[in-house]
Amino acid sequence: MSIDYLIIGQGLSGTFLSYYLLQAGKKVFVIDKSTPFTASKVASGVINPVTGRRIVRTWRIEELLPFALKAYTELGNEFGKNLVKKSSVLDFHPSLQMKEAFDKRLSEEREYLHIPATFEWKSYFNYHFDIGEINPCLLADINVMLDCWREKLTSEKVLINEEFSWDNCLVNNDFITYKNITAKKIIFCDGVAGTDNPFFKNLPYAPNKGEAIIAKIPGLPQNYIYKQGISIVPWRDDLFWIGSSYEWNFANVQPTSAYRERVASQLKYWLKVPFEIVDHIASVRPANMERRPFVGLHPRFSTVGILNGMGTKGCSLAPFFAKQLTSHLTEGKPIYADADVKRFEKILSRKLN
Ligand SMILES: Cc1cc2nc3c(=O)[nH]c(=O)nc-3n(C[C@H](O)[C@H](O)[C@H](O)COP(=O)(O)OP(=O)(O)OC[C@H]3O[C@@H](n4cnc5c(N)ncnc54)[C@H](O)[C@@H]3O)c2cc1C
């Protein structure tokens, strides 16, 4: 089989890259080993334009947020699903200091920060320092997107559920081969597995484990994202996703009883309404030291490419940079210098081993 692009991985990155390359009329084949708890499957799907203790805009959000809205809407149209909605984060200030910080930023950041409309939040939550609103945010249904896109690619016989193995792959100057496939290029969208990829393992990855609780909270309105240290996010089947942790040192990727207990006691303190924990999930974010994605072709091996390093923001970064990588591959357009993997030319030019 002769194709244009062989894509390894069908998380957020591989999904959007295969979508845009197919849209550009290219012949694509995707290899993805289905596992239940990848970063994309565990993600809450929130795109929050303003984050951190300083409540500042996230990198390039003015472009990323409208692009993501369009990307999820268009991809959803492929299979008649609404994959994204506009939402608000209600920020329950955890301290007087945080309330003052929010109030100060409110006068400077008029686009995304607001005072929420009055509502009886006191019947749902215990809180002492008012609420701020971050709007617009987006909430994407990542799991439905991954499942529907996988089904479509599988039915078109352009996705196979198997583990990619280097034993079967040969990288040449003008093409690559994998088993019976010959492709012009191979593009790795392999998430945290990229830390072992012989072509890209020297990149400054900093894998980061995140755990989340899935709970029933009957009666809590499903049209907001609630935040007070942890976030409570509407999830499928009237459930809520609650999380998450950020751990750089971890022994394994399993959910821990310590995290479950910590969240349960936070919820007991914060919520006035009953809740029931029904699941507990965990995965590892393909994060990196620079907090910028890895996008483009290897500086020495032009048949090998990457779309990775999405860190905590894959829901907004993956669609945008999948499109940018597609335009680069098919029309020679540039990739933003601070995302282009060529910025690591020096370390990527070290001898492979
Ligand atoms: C708890 C948690 C909450 C999060 N919440 C959010 C959020 O609300 N908003 C946000 O923007 N981001 C969030 N993220 C981050 C986001 O999930 C990641 O940035 C994003 O999912 C990365 O997508 P990816 O496609 O690059 O990698 P992955 O999702 O890891 O996908 C990689 C794919 O490649 C496959 N693969 C790897 N190696 C091989 C191989 N050898 N053979 C075959 N297949 C292979 C894997 O099985 C997988 O399907 C969260 C992450 C976590 C852990």
Image (spheres, rainbow, N blue to C red):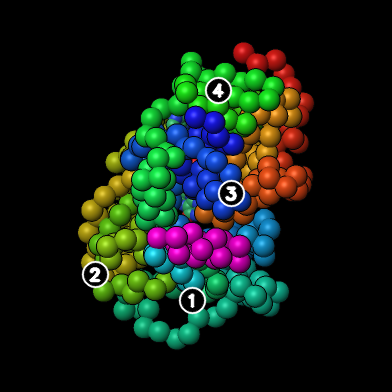
- For mark 4, what is the residue? 177
Q: Are marks 2 and 3 in contact (CB under 8 Å)?
A: no
Between discs 3 and 1, the one toward the N terminus: 3
Between discs 1 and 4, the one toward the N terminus: 1
Q: Amino acid at mark 3?
A: Gly
Q: Secondary structure at mark 1?
A: loop
Asked if the residue at label 4 sits under 8 Å from ligand 1, the reply is: no
Give the distance between the C-alpha atoms of the residues marked 1 and 4, in whole angstroms.
59 Å
Q: Position of residue 126 (x, y in %)?
A: 36, 71
Q: Are marks 1 and 4 in contact (CB under 8 Å)?
A: no
Q: Amino acid at mark 2?
A: Pro
- For mark 2, what is the residue? 218
Of residue 346 and residue 132, the one placed in the foreground of this image is 346
Give the distance between the C-alpha atoms of the residues marked 4 and 3, in whole angstroms.
21 Å
Between discs 4 and 3, the one toward the N terminus: 3
Q: Nearer the viewer, mark 2 or mark 1?
A: 2
The residues colored magenta run 65-79
Q: How many marks?
A: 4
Q: Main secondary structure of the magenta part?
A: helix
Question: Residue furthest toward the bottom?
Answer: 118
